[in-house]
Image (tube, rainbow, N blue to C red):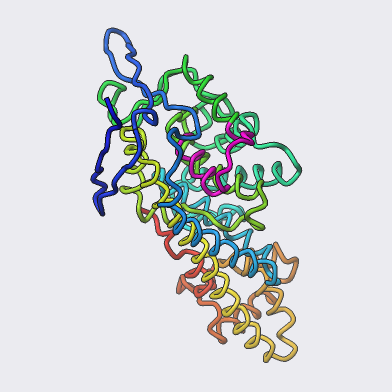
Amino acid sequence: MGPRWDVVELGIKKIEVKVDIKKRIGTYVRQGITGAYYQAYVPQPLPPDPALNMEQLYPYLDKAISAVAELNGVAKSIPNISLFIYMYVRKEALLSSQIEGTQSSFADLMLFEHEQKPDVAIEDVEEVSHYVAAINYGLKRIKEGFPLSLRLIREIHGVLLSGGRGKHKDPGEFRRSQNWIGGSRPGNALFVPPSPEYLKQCLADLEGFFYDEACTYHILIKAGLVHLQFETIHPFLDGNGRIGRLLIILMLCDNGFLSVPIVYLSLYLKQNRALYYELLQQVRENGTWEAWFEFFLQGVSYSAQQALLTIEKINTLFAHDMAEIEGLGKARFSALLVFEHLKKLPQVTVALLAQELDISEPTARSSLKHLQQLRIVEEVTGKMRDRTYVYRKYLDILEQGAEPL
């Protein structure tokens, strides 16, 4: 029998698959639990065979490379890149957690990190906070020269699930039981990953691909391959989506393609999550890797462009507000101190500022009053005591796209 040529309906367009997809499709293995049977999917090892049709993908790849290169150039020249990384890591943690159903806002996370009470369930904010720690842990290990490996993935997972709802889901350990996606049991699930007896080999193949020098694909292609394969293997009882998305940034930073960790796809995936899940499943069922990469590479371009736009908006805002504060005369010194703190915590109280900046409450209150008169901050409670002040214009930029689902 000759190659199978398929046209796959993706909801937005039809993409012709000009490869023998049988070699790309994994194997369904019949499994049983207490008399009930189901089909668990075991993927083919990476890279795909037949090879990707790069002629189809080069236009998307070139745009993505150019977008990231422009971002790298801008990032090297701005004075507040460390602050931007600090905030962008938190935005990624928030967005990636929201995809998994966590209901938390940027302001909630900021309050929680400064030991203040958030407005949502504490477990939701804890999950986001642990993801911040997991991102930072992984980036630190990579920067120190530790290789991207199954060991590092387990370590990061251990940090991610070190508290909150996931602490009972074997943090830092690959699963020893069957999991599934959708449905109430494997028999009626939307997708069933490899069963435990196949998991070890799937993960060994994935780790081998990390170091496969014979694979000449661009790092963006390799990252897209690894992300989808990881999601298909689904090696943990919980946290697979978050770890899979984090792997993208770790690979790009480890390779040196990304100079600073500020290209995250979670906003793009959140906005297109139905298509995202559909494309993952289409690769498993039909071998349509090219369709996935058109989507993925457009996501990289979009995410890099969004990062550039955010940098521009924040720097413009900071420059404008700094100029306003400089006109305060002697009061500008304490006002600038408070202003710098607002860059890391855009929602504050007098008592919190006094404690964290080691200044008197009258000084903190006076500075906030000056900033309020300059329309840099606004008071949001309307109360006479225990007032809360928000750097609204800054918070609005940070929270763009990060509204809870």
Report the predominant secondary structure element of the magenta stretch: helix
Q: Is residue 115 visible?
A: yes
State yes or no: residue 213 in magenta.
yes
Q: Residue at x 50, y 75 (%)?
A: 393
Q: Position of residue 16 (x, y in %)?
A: 29, 46
For the residue pair 282 and 151, the one nearer the viewer reads as 282
Farthest residue, direction top: 35
Q: Position of residue 110 (x, y in %)?
A: 56, 58
Vertical comparison of 295 with 182: above or below: below
State yes or no: residue 234 in magenta.
no
Vertical comparison of 351 with 43: above or below: below
Q: Position of residue 236 (x, y in %)?
A: 49, 28
Q: Quadrant of the N terminus?
A: top left
Q: Residue at x 45, y 57 (%)?
A: 60
Q: Residue at x 54, y 73 (%)?
A: 391
Q: Position of residue 39 (x, y in %)?
A: 31, 19
For the residue pair 300 and 114, the one nearer the viewer reads as 300
Horizontal side of residue 87 vs 45, given as left or right: right
Horizontal side of residue 123 vs 289, given as left or right: right
Magenta highlight range: 209-229
Vertical comparison of 28 with 77: above or below: above
Farthest residue, direction front: 2
